[in-house]
Image: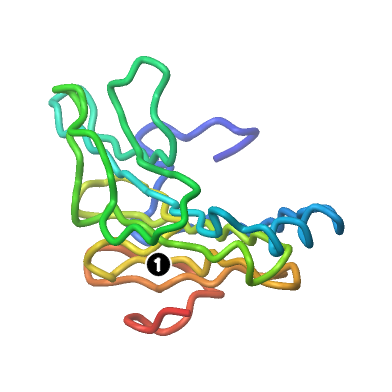
Amino acid sequence: MAGGVLAPGAHPVHKRLTAALGVVALSLGPGLADAAAAEAPAPYLNLHQCLYYSASASASDHFTTFVPSRDGRFLAGTNVSGTVDRTPGCGGGDGNFGLVPLLSGVKTLDLRSGRCLNPHQCTYYSSSADNYFNTVVPSSDGRFAAGTNVSGTADAHPAVVAATETTSSSPPCPTPGHST
């Protein structure tokens, strides 16, 4: 690749993952965090991750959503509640893109446990689908996870689960099968 142009026949994606890992801390203001902890009528953020896939002849693509699309074709049940959600609330898709239940998931975060929301994102590459997908919460089957959490401090590095036989990731991922 010279000057941002691919050489003829070159493929921009290697069969190993070039992972995009990220973490950002979102903080409640000091007074707001204390008030939320004291009152806490709805102390849980139930973060629903819904992963959709299209295997059409013209495009194979994964995409992840945490909130419903404006047109209602793709749903995600992310909510703040007094109860813990145990299964992801996802829509079925739109006919072109279908839900992948195995890669969808839900993570409940106790908003009383700190003033920093630390969403961790890991992008995985699937060689079998020749496609990338993102995760911020554990997949339903547990193979893919990220260390999204609420704590008293901001996280500096993402915590993700490493590759399986059909996906790969690059450091700083921990050993496959070990989540944080």
Q: Is residue 96 above or below residue 27?
A: above
Please name the residue that numbered disc 1 is placed on. Answer: 145
Q: Is residue 119 above or below residue 176?
A: above
Q: Dot 1: within a 10 Å radius of its alpha carbon, few (fewer than 14), some, or many (20 or more) residues? A: many
Pick whichever, 158 or 152, lies toward us.
Answer: 152
Percent x, y of residue 128: 19, 53
Q: How is the image coloured?
A: rainbow
Pick whichever, 112 or 22, lies toward us.
Answer: 112
Q: From the viewer's perspective, is 133 left or right of 104? A: right
The residue at 63%/67% (across/down) is 112
Percent x, y of residue 155: 70, 70
The residue at 29%/61% (across/down) is 86
Helix or strand or loop: what does disc 1 sit on? loop
Three-letter code, disc 1: Ala
Percent x, y of residue 174: 47, 81
* Quarter of the picture holding the N terminus: top right
